[in-house]
Amino acid sequence: MHYIPSYIKLNTTGELQKRILILNDILKECKLCPRQCHVNRLKGELGFCRAGERLVVSSIFPHFGEEAPLVGSRGSGTIFLTHCNLRCIFCQNHDISHQGHGETISSEQFAHHMYTLQKRGCHNINFVTPTHYLPQIIASLPFAIDLGLNLPLVYNCGGYESLKAIKLLDGIIDIYMPDVKFAEREVAEKYAQAPDYPEVVKKALKEMYRQAGDLEINKEGVARKGLLIRHLVMPKGLAGTRNIMHFISSEISPHTYVNVMSQYHPEYKSFDYPELNRAITHKEYAEAIDITKKEGLYRGVPQV
């Protein structure tokens, strides 16, 4: 049986349009994320993330390098959005996230891109770094639904989310995929200018799980709904893997699908920080995997 995303029902009842109006109103005094910049983006004012009134997209393509339940056999329909509400000094996409390199498009054009990805056979639509463009993205959905879009939507974010904004996505987003980055305030402040990150991400995770639950995977091995968490292992344990995994297992769910990632390497400004100016070792990664398993997490955890 084909999975019908709930955003289609919300569009039929008129609830989706109500959410669009609420989100668009937030742009007048932007508080889409925890930065709470209060700038009027509809009048050209820019806040911390530097995103303006219109969508700016870097690339759109079927991605085969994501997690297996997203990729399936035909790829994840991935849309890389520019700018970011974090300032991670080790960002591997800094030209997109920090410098904003991309193409400005309308919500209607965005809708056509989503539908094109569906026609190409993708299993889902994967929004990468969508936080600061939520009003414009959600405004594109009625256009996309009219075209025939019926794929699950993936919210692929850095975890630094406004609880109010996430609640407005209830029934719209099918799969939440936050990258849980830091467990300690001092680390989050030093490397991402977000000292409140650890508290913020915990609240966001709980709300995401309340909405979507554990990751549901169909008989073809493709995800259709739920929470999938990423965690990038950093040198010298700076990401706080033990605390993060304990929180996920004890306060979210021991059945959470967790991808413990090994691909950290120096990028952008991390060369200026001796503790970050190297890739992680095999031992560091193996220890992170061991911690994850000891916390009782087993879904998606790689073998080493």
Image: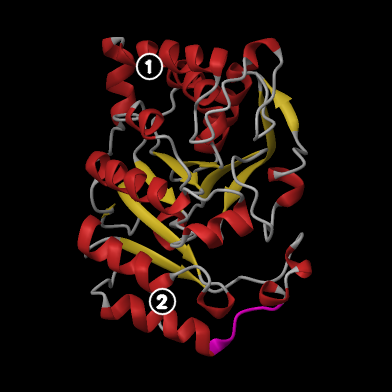
Frontmost of labels 2 and 1 is 1
Residue in view at x 26 percent, y 43 percent:
212
| Foreground pick, 93 / 300 | 93
What separation in Å lies between label 2 and label 1 (alpha carbons)?
38 Å
Left or right, 125 with reference to 11:
right
Looking at the picture, tell me which residue is in the foreground, 50 or 147: 50
Residue 22 position in % (x across, y down)? 41, 14
Please say whether residue 300 is visible from this viewpoint: no
Q: Residue 7, can we see it?
A: yes
Q: Which mark is residue 185?
A: none
On the rendered structure, is 186 left or right of 4?
right
Task: Tell me residue 127's x, y (percent).
Answer: 52, 40
Is 96 positioned to the left or the right of 221 in the image? right
Mark 2: secondary structure: loop
Tell me, yes or no, whether the highlighted magenta stretch contains residue 89: no
State the extent of the magenta-drawn residues as a range.
278-282
Residue at position x 55%, y 21% in the image: 30
- What SS does tag 1 mark? helix
Q: List the residue tagged with mark 1.
A: 19
Position of 77 relative to 261 (above/below): above
Quarter containing the N terminus: top left
**Residue type pointed to by label 1:** Arg
Question: Mark 2 Cα within 10 Å, few/some/many (few <14, many 20+)?
Answer: some
Residue bearing mark 2:
302
